[in-house]
Image (spheres, rainbow, N blue to C red):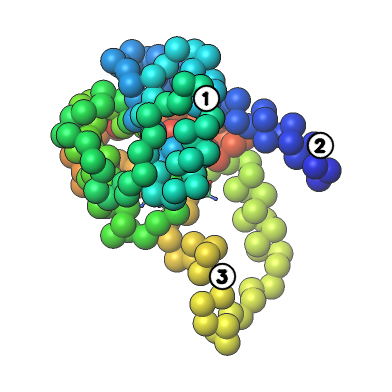
Amino acid sequence: MSHKREGIVKKINNRSVYRTIMRAYNACAPTPPLLMAPCSHGWFFDWFRRDGVGVVGIDIEKHRVEEARARVSPPMETIEGNILEMPFADNQFEFVVCNRFILHFNDKFKAKAMKELARVTRRWLLVHYDYKYSIRQFGRLIKAARTPKKDFSNHPGYRIWKREGRKLRYDRKMMAQEGQAAGLRIRKLYFVSYLISERVYCLYEK
Ligand SMILES: C[S@@+](CC[C@H](N)C(=O)[O-])C[C@H]1O[C@@H](n2cnc3c(N)ncnc32)[C@H](O)[C@@H]1O
């Protein structure tokens, strides 16, 4: 794909993601600020500012936090810290967003992170997952069925970054289980584009 086309696709995708987050946010009508954990380089801070949504962000990487602070002026409050031990009070935020995070980690880490996210939310937690069923995923399965299985047994450590052996794609039951372990129940799933995109936002209620 050319850089230009890649840029346009990314832009459209980001807009759809932001719109999906805002659909959930507006439906809950929470008291701001929302907590974005993690916030990376200030995901959507410019659009949140434009739409008058107050945000507090947290991220573990210093350079990401610096980027997030420079994203809008005056800056959104952004804290350098670990999601597993956030420097916030119990129930501090009415609406917490966890974007592009949970699905990257193993079960033990995810369970801890979900508990900590549940601790700091007063009511709502919106978590990004990749859904099990989508046209994209169907295409991948067909491609995988046609590709001979590679043997990586002689390459210890290789492809670990590919999240091998982890729950990459979720159905509603898996999301419900993860939430339940942290004292949360599913209120609604918000699909970015049902069956076309695999990205889904699960709105949990405490
Ligand atoms: C998990 S990474 C996802 C990277 C992936 N390439 C993506 O964007 O889809 C997203 C953000 O999480 C942050 N992060 C990773 N571990 C964290 C932790 N324990 N606490 C807070 N932020 C964390 C990273 O610094 C990064 O900005």
Q: Quadrant of the C terminus?
A: top left
Q: Residue furthest left?
A: 90
- Disc nearer the start of the sequence (1/2): 2
80, above or below 10, in the image: below
Q: What residue sits 54% from the left and 30% below the top?
A: 71
Label 2: how many Cα within 10 Å (few below 14, some 14–19, many 20+): few
Residue contact at pointers 3 and 1, CB within 8 angstroms: no
Amino acid on which the number 3 mark rests in the picture: Arg
* Circle 2 SS class: helix
Q: What residue sits 67% from the left and 30% below the top?
A: 11
Q: Tell me the residue that label 3 is attached to.
A: 159
Q: Tell me the residue that label 1 is attached to.
A: 72
Q: Tell me the residue that label 2 is attached to.
A: 4
Looking at the rendered image, the disc whose residue lies closer to the viewer, 1 or 2, is 1
Q: What residue sits 22% from the left and 36% below the top?
A: 88
**Could you say which is closer to the camera, residue 195 or residue 151?**
151
**Could you say which is closer to the camera, residue 144 or residue 57?**
57
Q: Any atom of ligand 1 within 8 Å of the CB at mark 2?
A: no
Q: Position of residue 94 (x, y in %)?
A: 26, 23
**Corner quadrant of residue 9:** top right
* Circle 1 SS class: loop
Amino acid on which the number 1 mark rests in the picture: Val
Q: Residue furthest bottom?
A: 154
Image-based side of 170 in relation to 161, left or right: left
Amino acid on which the number 2 mark rests in the picture: Lys
Label 3: how many Cα within 10 Å (few below 14, some 14–19, many 20+): few
Alpha carbon of mark 1 to alpha carbon of mark 2: how far? 25 Å
- Disc nearer the start of the sequence (2/3): 2
Q: Position of residue 2 (x, y in %)?
A: 83, 43
Q: What residue sits 40% from the left and 56% below the top?
A: 105
